């Protein structure tokens, strides 16, 4: 018995080791399978997280463009990112960081080529040709970070990174403009007057004298109004012209007491002002444009942008070309045009000073081709020497306000993050 | 030396007992091994099926997100069935193709349940180099003819087989009338390597909002003849289904009213007793428009 117990021969240990090895191999295989599944799920989750962040950054960038449009006077930065978003045109990094927290969005070392920031956005001009309209390759990346061609469209690209997975989305963002309900009048104010009693056409309500001749209306065209509110005045005082001598031709002058004393509401004025701010043609309170600056008011390239003068200013002179008609808004002040200057477009005096005198006046052979509108108790002196006011209905299309920015349909894309 | 000379061995009974015990242990171990191996194989097959299905749903969602509407109709989907969708999309990895400067392609996803033991989800694609897309192939079988490429994306779908009726695609809004109305697509893919046995089905779901959908605006016009030979038309009730800013153009008696670009038109100098036709056209930023006309007799 003692000998038997002392005998150390046998194979149990070897068998146990073999069995353990087999079981371990099977266990490790199962573990590897589970681990692979876990990694695939994690990668997919990270991709979705990165996509969500990139889309949020894109929308945040569009929100900023909704407030301020990038122009030559106010270009966007080369790149906005989570760590460098100092421009007013960049998305708010705090807001994005607050909304996108969690393990996926923490910083960690990633392979080279992965963007270092959690998110980045870029603004680029959309180019001019059809082929340029597409967001492919480096041609878009190398363009200006603002609306260079002034067509009211820029590309926005946003990248989001989560757990070292990068996703990129792009969209063409267009500037919205709304037309203002402006009266189709040659002249509108509280009163209207000419400076002589001679037989001549001083106000052409049809546009028969419009320049260039190609702008003149066809036979079916309707003449525009010369309309006055006449508040606190007699009819003879508020329509002071020689009707029998054809000074308003065709004569459409009428007294309409019900006409609103404020042509645009405060909200509509704000939209027009934002247009001017975007275009760099806004004159804040206390600053007045010179005659030369009125001739070439816009520092941007946005054709037809309004020139918005807060005042108080008594503006004079100016004039522009038929190919660059303008929309002059004088909030507090007057406008006088003399000599042989011609202003093409709409002159709108808000008359915040509540003057009952002449707020817009013409003299000499000066001419306004478009429309003249004066709010409140103020009036218009149309001049004496020639056809000083020529109605041009095309000018009213310039009366537009900034209505924010939005993504143009059919341009939203997921693109490879390296593109 | 003592050991070598020791001729003692196991008795027959000892050997039989040991052999019996060994057989019992080995049988148990092999049984466990067999069960483990079988489960492992099933799990691996299930995991492979899930991987493939996940990749398919991921690609499907990406293509749907990049879905592009046509300029004329505005809708993204061209066919919308529970097991069959067709849509145009942008293949951002390829880029412009000739005159097809948007890099558009057409994709179809459909379910082939003709083999009851092997339900498959197919992806078919059509590409072109012309500026105008060709018509979509109309064949209903899955996969159908007329497509440039056919790819079996999922092999073990069980949305239909076994008497099931689980739509692969659902759409929103629920009350859509035409595919162009659809603004969102739900994907519900069910896969099972061996229906009827464990470990059972896996379900992958996703919901995609069609970001490039552009629906037509609606023009609404109310014209009233006023005093002093004026007619006032109000188009402020016009609306865009996507909430975008509209632009307005007006015409009177068939001729454009120059400068009239607001939602309101005040047209004067209209003779008493005449009748005029006013037309409002509203256009959204995507270029889709709608027109309404009203005739106004002047008092």
Image (cartoon, helix red, strand yellow):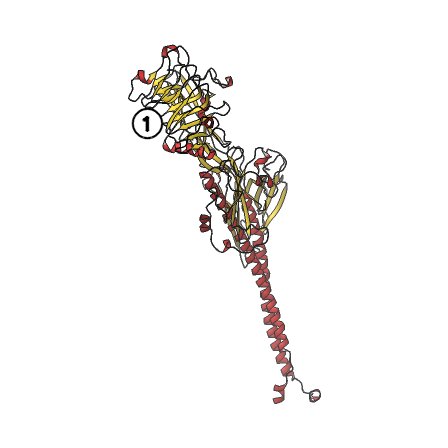
Residue carrying label 1? A354
Give neighbour class at mark 1: few <14, some 14-19, many 20+ (Cα, 10 Å).
some
Q: Is residue A168 above or below residue A307?
A: below
- Counting from the top left corner in percent of width and height, residue B123 is at 59, 45
Residue A272, picture quadrant: top left
Above or below: residue A379 compared with residue B22: above
Residue A367 versus residue A403: which sits nearer the camera? Answer: A367
Give the number of marks.
1
Identify which residue, B66 or A107, lies in the foreground.
A107
In this rendering, the answer to whether A222 lies above or below B67 is above
Q: Nearer the viewer, residue A274 or A343?
A: A343
Residue A189 appears anywhere in the view: yes
Where residue A350 appears, as percent x and y from the top left, is 37, 28
Give the residue drawn at x 62%, y 70%: A21
Q: What chain is tagged by disc 1? A: A
Q: Quadrant of the N terminus of chain A?
A: bottom right
Q: Position of residue A106 (x, y in %)?
A: 50, 55
B100 left or right of B276? right
Above or below for B274 versus A286: above
Q: Is residue B299 visible?
A: no
Q: Position of residue A365 (x, y in %)?
A: 44, 16
Q: Which quarter of the figure is the C terminus of chain A placed in?
A: top right
What secondary structure is marked by label 1?
Answer: loop
């Amino acid at each position: 018995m003692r000998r038997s117990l002392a005998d150390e021969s046998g194979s149990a240990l070897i068998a146990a080791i073999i069995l353990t090895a087999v079981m371990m191999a099977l266990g490790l295989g199962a573990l590897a399978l589970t681990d692979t599944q876990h990694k695939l799920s994690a990668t997919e989750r990270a991709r979705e997280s990165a996509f969500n962040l990139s889309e949020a950054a894109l929308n945040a960038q569009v929100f900023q463009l909704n407030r301020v449009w990038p122009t030559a006077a106010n270009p966007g930065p080369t790149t906005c990112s989570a760590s460098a978003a100092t421009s007013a045109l960049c998305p708010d990094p705090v807001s994005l960081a607050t909304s996108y927290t969690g393990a996926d969005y923490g910083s960690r070392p990633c392979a080279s080529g992965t963007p270092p920031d959690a998110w980045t956005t870029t603004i680029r001009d959309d180019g001019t040709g059809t082929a340029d309209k597409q967001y492919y390759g480096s041609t878009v990346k190398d363009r200006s970070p603002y609306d260079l061609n002034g067509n009211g469209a820029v590309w926005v690209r946003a990248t989001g990174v989560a757990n070292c997975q990068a996703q990129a989305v792009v969209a063409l963002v267009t500037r919205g403009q709304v037309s203002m309900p402006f009266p189709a009048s040659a002249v509108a104010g509280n009163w209207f007057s000419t400076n002589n009693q001679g037989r001549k056409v001083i106000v052409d309500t049809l546009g028969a004298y419009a320049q260039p001749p190609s702008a003149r209306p066809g036979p079916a065209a309707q003449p525009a109004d010369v309309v006055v509110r006449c508040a606190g005045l007699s009819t003879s005082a508020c329509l002071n012209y020689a009707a029998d001598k054809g000074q308003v031709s065709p004569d459409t002058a009428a007294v309409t007491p019900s006409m609103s004393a404020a042509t645009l509401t405060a909200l509509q004025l704000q939209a027009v002002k934002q247009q001017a701010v975007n275009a760099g043609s806004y004159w804040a309170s206390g600053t007045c444009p010179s005659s030369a600056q009125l001739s070439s008011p816009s520092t941007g390239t946005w054709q037809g942008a309004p020139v918005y003068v807060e005042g108080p200013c008594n503006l004079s002179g100016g004039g522009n070309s038929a190919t660059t008609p303008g929309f002059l808004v004088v909030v507090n002040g007057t406008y006088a045009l003399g000599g042989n200057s011609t202003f093409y477009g709409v002159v709108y005096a808000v008359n915040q000073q509540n003057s009952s005198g002449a707020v817009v006046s013409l003299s000499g052979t000066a001419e306004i081709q478009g429309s003249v509108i004066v709010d409140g108790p103020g009036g218009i002196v149309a001049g004496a020497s020639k056809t000083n006011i020529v109605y041009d209905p095309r000018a009213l299309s310039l009366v537009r306000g900034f209505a924010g920015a939005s993504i143009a349909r059919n341009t939203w894309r997921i693109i490879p993050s390296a593109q | 030396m003592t050991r070598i000379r020791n001729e003692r061995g196991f008795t027959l009974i000892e050997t039989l007992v040991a052999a019996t015990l060994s057989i019992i242990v080995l049988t148990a171990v092999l049984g466990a091994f067999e069960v483990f191996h079988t489960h492992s194989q099933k799990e691996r097959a299930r995991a492979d099926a899930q991987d493939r299905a996940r990749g398919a749903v991921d690609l499907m969602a990406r293509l749907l997100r990049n879905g592009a509407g046509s300029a004329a109709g505005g809708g993204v989907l061209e066919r919308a069935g529970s097991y069959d969708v067709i849509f145009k999309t942008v293949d951002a990895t390829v880029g412009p193709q000739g005159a097809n400067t948007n890099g558009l392609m057409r994709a179809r996803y459909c379910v082939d349940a003709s083999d009851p033991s092997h339900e498959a989800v197919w992806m078919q694609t059509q590409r072109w180099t012309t500026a105008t897309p060709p018509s979509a192939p109309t064949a209903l079988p899955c996969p159908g003819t007329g497509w440039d490429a056919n790819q079996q994306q999922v092999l073990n779908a069980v949305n239909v087989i076994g008497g099931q009726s689980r739509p692969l695609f659902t759409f929103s809004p629920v009350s859509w009338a035409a595919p162009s109305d659809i603004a969102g697509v739900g994907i519900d893919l069910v896969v099972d390597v061996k229906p009827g046995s464990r470990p059972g089905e896996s379900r992958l779901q996703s919901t995609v909002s069609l970001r490039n959908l552009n629906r037509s605006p609606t023009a609404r016009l109310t014209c009233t003849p006023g005093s002093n030979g004026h007619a006032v038309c109000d188009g402020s009730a016009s609306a865009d289904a996507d909430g975008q800013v509209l632009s307005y153009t007006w015409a009177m008696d068939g001729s454009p009213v120059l400068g009239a670009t607001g939602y309101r038109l005040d047209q004067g100098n209209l003779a008493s007793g005449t009748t005029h036709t006013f037309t409002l056209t509203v256009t959204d930023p995507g270029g889709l428009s709608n027109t309404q006309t009203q005739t106004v007799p002047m008092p």
